[in-house]
Image (cartoon, rainbow, N blue to C red):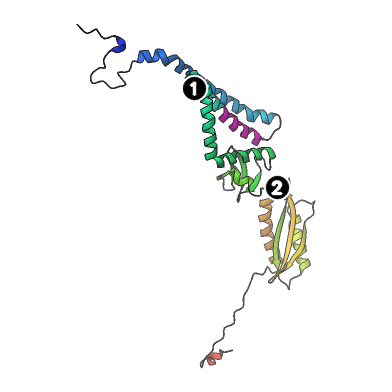
Amino acid sequence: MPAAAPTPDTAPPLPGASWLQNLDWERIFETYGLPLIGAIVVLLVGIWIARRLSNVLPRATARVGLDPMLGSFMRNVVYAAALVIVAVLAIATLGVPISPLLAVLGTAGLAVGLALKDSLSNIASGVMLVTLRPFRVGDVVTVAGQTGTVREVRIFQTVLTGADNQHTTIPNTLITAEPIINLTAEPTRRIELVIGIGYEDDIQLARDTALSIMKADKRVLATPAPDVVVYELGAHSINLGIRCHVLADDHFGTKVTLLEQLKLGYDKAGINIPYPQQDMHLYLHGKDSGVGGAGP
């Protein structure tokens, strides 16, 4: 009995062709083509909407007078959550049941959460920083041993820009676990210099010289008034506390200028700024100890 002619569904593979060439692309496209195209469209449109929505949040929060740090943090959170939702919708478009998928995602999320508990702690710390707001974007802070200007609070890290224009990325948990020093929280700051003078020098002359130097600098505020007090009768010097208030932005520049002017002013007034000294006495022992006048 002669063999039946092969139909397109049972056509034998072409000799010498790869498995990719032997696939029935027409049938595959008829079965999965439209759902696949739909999933791609959902994915692309969803990503576009997520990006637009997340970019609107910083501007919206700025219009209502909220901290830009809050808008930046919300943008990152909303964008990440929107991507997860878009991915689930795209998979559902392919005909995959959502309920089992959500159950799998929940189980996987629990496992990932246990494995990434430190990362989740960073997220919780980021929420605390945005909610409690110990600092704002643009503030100069000292956190986790680093000093710089706050540029952004992300989901997992906070970015600082140092005086050398280098970016420092610090995990949020390290920031909330240690004291936070905000150097620009108030509009003014106090400059406090400790300078020693010799015991033989005139304290009042040193005080008047320092006050005249501080009052001559226009950046030094008249209120609270500058003052000079005796901090300590030290081992080598009388330590004076030279104090004044300036605007927060003028703190560093005024401080270094005052240090230089105080040194020049004290030199001109004949006031000594002592430094630790140590006297050493050398004794020679033996039969030649008297030669040349050396000896005890």
Mark 1 = which residue?
91
Mark 2 = which residue?
248
Q: Tag 1: residue type?
A: Ile
The image quadrant of residue 84 is top right
Dominant secondary structure of the residues highlighted in magenta in the image: helix
Q: Position of residue 128 (x, y in %)?
A: 66, 40
As drawn, 153 above or below 97: below
Q: Position of residue 179 (x, y in %)?
A: 66, 49
Residue 218 seen by the camera: no
Q: Which mark is residue 129?
A: none
Task: Say if the magenta span includes residue 80.
Answer: yes
Q: Which residues are magenta?
A: 64-81
Residue 9 seen by the camera: yes
Specify which label sits upstream in the sequence, 1 or 2.
1
Quadrant showing the N terminus:
top left
Q: Position of residue 173 (x, y in %)?
A: 60, 44
Nearer the observer, 43 or 11: 11
Q: Residue furthest top?
A: 1
Nearer the observer, 22 or 76: 22
Nearer the observer, 157 or 84: 84
As drawn, 25 above or below 181: above
Q: Is residue 86 left or right of residue 243?
A: left
Q: Dot 2: what SS? A: helix
Q: Dot 1: what SS? A: helix
Q: Tag 2: residue type?
A: Ala
